[in-house]
Image (cartoon, rainbow, N blue to C red):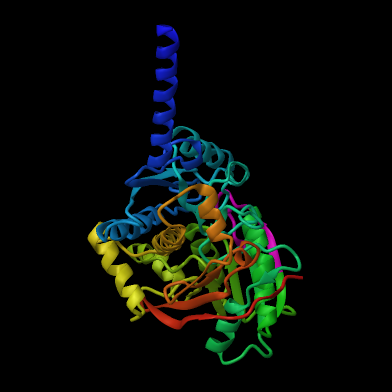
Amino acid sequence: MRRLICLAAAVALATTGCAAERAAGGGDAVAGVTATTIKIAGILTKTSASGYSTKDAEIGARARFERANATGGVNGRTIEFAGAEDDNQDAAKGDAAAKKLVQRDKVFALVPVHAPNFGGAVFLERTRVPWFGWATGPQWCGTTTGFGYNGCLAPAPGAGSQTWWGHQMAALLGGARGRTVYVQTSDSSGSKYGGKTISQSFQAAGFEVVGLNSGLPGAAPPPDWLPYVNKIMTSNGGKPPDVLVSIIAGTKFNTGLYSALKKAGYRGVLTDATSYDAAILRDPATAQALEGVIAAPMFEPFESDAPEIAQLRADVEKTAPGTTLTQHLAIGYWAADIFLKILQQTGKDVTREKFLAIANGGFSYANPGFGRITYPKDHTEPNGCGALVKLEGGVFKVARNMKCFDNVPLK
C-alpha cells in the first residue's frame, strides 16, 4: 500500500510539474517561452568568400528588441535575443544552424534570417518554427512560417510581382518611353530569380529590356570583367543600354562591374539593390566606383525626416553608439518590428501555432519605415514598396521617398 501511495504521489508531482512547465511556457509546444521571456535568435551571412556580409542585421534586430524590452516587453514578456549564427553563404551551414537553434538552443523563432542562400527553410516549415527576414529567394515563398519583412521577392508564375523599382526609376528619369534596360545577375538561385522579377518590373513601367545575363559566377568576382562588359555595351542594337540593373549580392561584385563599365565608357544609369551602404564610403576606390549609382532600398532611407526613421536612428544609437547605419541593419530592424507586432497581437498565451494563426489569419501592418505587409498574401508576393537613393559627391541623397505600387502577375 505504501508503495502505491508513493507511486501515486510521484505521478501527481510529475503531472503538477508538467502543468507548471506548460503554464510557464516550457515544453516542445512553447519552446523558448517562459513566464517572463521569449528566446529569439537569427541566421545571417556574416562572412563569405565574396565578402558579402549581412552581419549588421543583428544590430538592427537587437536595437528594436531592446526598445521593446525597455518599455516592458510584449504582453509581460521581454525578448531574450541570443544573437545570430553565421551561415557563410552556404545552404548546408544555414540548415545546420537552424537545427541547432531550434533543437538544441530551443528558440521560439528565428529573427532575423538574412542570407541569400539560406538552407533551413524546409526544416523550419516542417517543424512549424516562425522565421523573419529578407525574403530574397524562392525558399521563402509559399511557406506558412517564413515572413519576409517586405513579402516574397521570388513569386511563382502567376503570382503578384513588384513594379515599384521600375516605376520609381521612370519617375526619377522623367519617364520610361524610349529607354532601354539591361539586367545582370549572378548564377545563384536568388539572383537569377531576382533578374526575372526585376526585368518585369521595368517592363511594367514602360522600359524596354534588351538583355538579361545570369552567367556571372556567384561565389567570387571574375578575374576578367571584359566579357560581361562587352555584352552590356552592345546590348542595345550595338549600343549601351540607358539603364544597367545589377542583381548581385556583394559590393565587390558591383565595384568590379561598375569600374569596368565606366572604364569602357558607359555613361548610362547604374542601379542595384545593395549599394546603399555607408560602409562603402570608408574606401575611396569603392566610393568612386559607386559614385552616381542609384540604390533601391526596400525601406525609407536613413536620410529621411520621417518620425519612424528618427526612432530607428535613436534606437540604434542607444544600443550601439556610433554604429554606421546600413541596409542590412535596417532589414534586421524592420524584421524584428514586424515580429513584435504579431507577437503583441498573439496575446499572453503564446504558442507557435497561435502565433502562426494570428500571422496568417489576415494580419496587416502599415509603417512608413518599410511600407506595408499583409499575410498570408505576402507569403507569395512582394509588398510592392521601395525607395531610391543616389550616391552623389560621396554622400547619399534621397532620390525618391518610399512609395508602394500595385503588383502585376509574374509571367
Q: Nearer the viewer, residue 352 or 165?
A: 352
Residue 173 in the image, given as x and y percentages of width and height = 55, 88
Whether residue 194 is visible to the viewer of this picture, yes or no, is: yes
Residue 226: say if magenta: yes
- Nearest the camera: 227 or 269? 269
Quarter of the image for residue 72 reads bottom left
Screen quadrant of the N terminus: top left
> Residue 346 location, x and y as percent?
46, 57
Residue 81 in view in this figure: no
Q: Which region of the structure is painted magenta? A: 212-227
For the point 69% across and 89% down, the residue is 178
Q: Quadrant of residue 174?
A: bottom right
Q: Pick the quarter of the image with the C terminus.
A: bottom right
Q: Is residue 271 magenta?
A: no
For residue 161, above or below residue 75:
below
Asked whether, in this view, residue 263 is left or right of residue 39, the answer is right
Residue 284's place in the image compared with 84, above or below, is below
Q: At 50% across and 63% down in the image, what residue appears? A: 149
